[in-house]
Every structure is written in structure tokens, then in C-alpha cells.
Image (cartoon, rainbow, N blue to C red):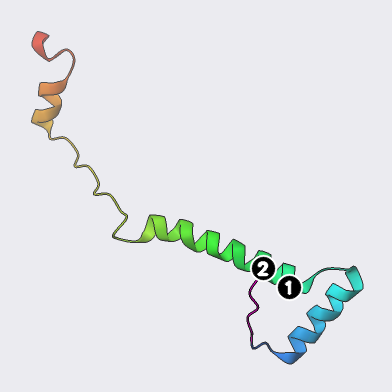
Amino acid sequence: MTLKTFNLNEEIYNKYSGHCKKHGISMSKQVEKFIAREVASLSSSLDIDTPETQKPKPRAPSLEDAKRNHPMSRYC
């Protein structure tokens, strides 16, 4: 386990810390879960949104391609 230091607004920290103590919640586990959700969200959006991972869109077939590849083309 590695500990890191975060700079938080004191008022927000105190309010959330009080909430966690009142309800028997581990504040550090809540922060860890939040960060894990953010990382998962970032990972999935990066997989979709980055140009390096985007596949080129297939071009639409031309009318001639469509006619040539139509299953009944030899009868028309």
C-alpha cells in the first residue's frame, strides 16, 4: 500500500470526514473507489475518443458497386 498526500479544501474535508465518521465509512476507501471509477471512465473514453485508436470509417459503396454486388445482379 502506498500513501499519497492530497491538498483538499479544509471545510469540505471536515464535512465529509464528519459524515464518514458518523456512518462508519472509511474515507480513504471512498476516495480510492472514486479514483477507480474515474480511471475506468477515462480509460473507456480514451479507447473510443483518441485518434490513435479510431478505426477509419468504411466508405459507402458506390451505386456501381451496389449493382455489381447485388445477389440478383446476374439476372438484371
Q: Amino acid at mark 1?
A: Ser
Where 26 falls versus 43 (above or below)?
A: below
Instruction: Identify residue for label 1.
Output: 28
Position of the N terminus by quadrant: bottom right
Q: Any magenta on residue 53?
A: no
Region in magenta = 1-6
Compare residues 66 and 40 and report the one nearer the observer.
40
Q: Position of residue 64 (x, y in %)?
A: 8, 29
Image quadrant in which you'd find residue 61: top left
Q: Residue at (69%, 89%) from the top-left corner?
A: 9
Q: Main secondary structure of the magenta part?
A: loop
Q: Is residue 33 left or right of residue 67?
A: right
Position of the C terminus by quadrant: top left
Image quadrant in which you'd find residue 8: bottom right
Q: Residue furthest top?
A: 75
| CB-based contact (under 8 Å), mark 1 and mark 2 | yes
Q: Residue furthest bottom?
A: 10
Distance Cα–Cα, label 1 vs label 2: 6 Å
Instruction: Identify residue for label 2.
Output: 32
Image quadrant in which you'd find residue 12: bottom right
Q: Amino acid at mark 2?
A: Glu
Compare residues 69 and 55 and report the one nearer the observer.
55
